[in-house]
Image: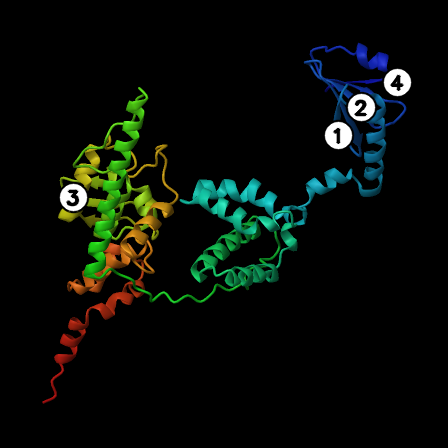
Amino acid sequence: MPRIIREPLTLKVINQAKPTGKLYRLRDATVPGLLLRVTPAGTKVWAITWGRGQERVIGTYPVMTLEGAREAARRELGEAAEHGAPVAVVEARKPASEKPITLGDFIRDHFAPWALANQKQGQATVDALEACFGGLYERELRSIAAFDIERFKTARKKHGIKPATINRDLDRIRKVYSCAFEWDFLTEHPLRKVKRIKVDNVRVRYLSDSEDKELRKALAAREVERRASRVRHNAWHEERGSVGHPQWPKDGYTDHIVPMVLLALNTGLRRGELFGLEWGNLNLQARLLTVEAGNAKSGKTRHLPLNDDAMRMLKQWKKQGDGKGLVFPSSSGARFNNINKAWSGIVAAAKLPDFNFHDLRHDFASKLVMAGVDLNTVRELLGHADIKMTLRYAHLAPGKLADAVSRINRT
């Protein structure tokens, strides 16, 4: 048992207390219940004791003076007499659902670590939450109600934000509250009644033959301009006797944009699947691309054959790197979060109205259906978990529908 010394506490007694190799305590006669703990290392720590040997550290000497310790001890021992323990201890003993915590603190201290460890886009989720709901971060977690989120929905609609984008935001904050409920920070889920906005998912935007040519023309023009810009840049350096940057190979690409777009057109990969694709997922000899479960929205692995267009691009693109890690790394070698700026420039140059990057996936699927590929095969190539998602392309195969109807001949 640690040794307890009972003697009046004075500055002289405190300063002369030396380590003995064992923890011991000096009790204060002025404020019964106040202790000075002297550790084997010589550290002097103020503590209070109440009840049956319950003890709580309240400060360290000399940061907390003798008088400061007595004042703090009187306050906390008074709380112990009234509540059975100091208020801080009472609060610490409460279940998480009874402890006050702000939305921001819950996300930063609890949800964010979980999201980063368990979600593919964990950091993007955390960043998006702060961007959208940062104004609520100082609010107590339990004080935020469904009405607050409904007002958020209304405000976003008024600013012209697309319903699909608003729904993604709602899904993120709903997940935060689901975790808070599951982890016992809440006794009920206040956002369960908040409904997503109905979105027409039937939209299928694909490229006409002329638009396909314009897109490829814009991609080629971008390559030409980037090479010309590099020439001008190097000439500027040469005039000043400094070193510029090496020119890209004539039969290669100036950056990741053209290869990424071409691969999307020929495989229907989602943007996130392209960003996370690694050279280890490609078997060029077998002309096969594998989307691993961890990089797929469906959570299931799928295999895609590579056509000639994709093969030509990948072989050249591989020559320009070391063929290791990400197929499309950022300049820092990390995974991309977006390519919005470059893509916007390409769409503008090609004059493609209402054409998003995801529409490259629609184009891939639409061309397959129009070429007579059955919908279940299209489903497998796209990685749809449900055939209902693939049925949006069914109207693009009128010949197959007409052929089916023609088989009923009543004459």
C-beta proximity under 8 Å, tags 1 and 2: yes
- Looking at the figure, which quarter contains the N terminus? top right
Q: Earlier in the sequence, mark 4 or mark 2?
A: 4
Q: Which residue is mark 4?
A: 8
Foreground pick, 20 / 127: 127
The label on residue 121 is none
Circle 3 or circle 2, nearest the eye = 3
Q: Residue at x 29, y 39 (%)?
A: 328
The label on residue 55 is 1
Amino acid of disc 3:
Met
Q: Residue at x 64, y 53 (%)?
A: 142
Amino acid of disc 1:
Glu
Q: Is residue 100 visible?
A: yes
Which structural element holds mark 2?
strand
Q: Earlier in the sequence, mark 1 or mark 2?
A: 2
The label on residue 35 is 2
* Left or right placement of residue 50 versus residue 185 in this view: right
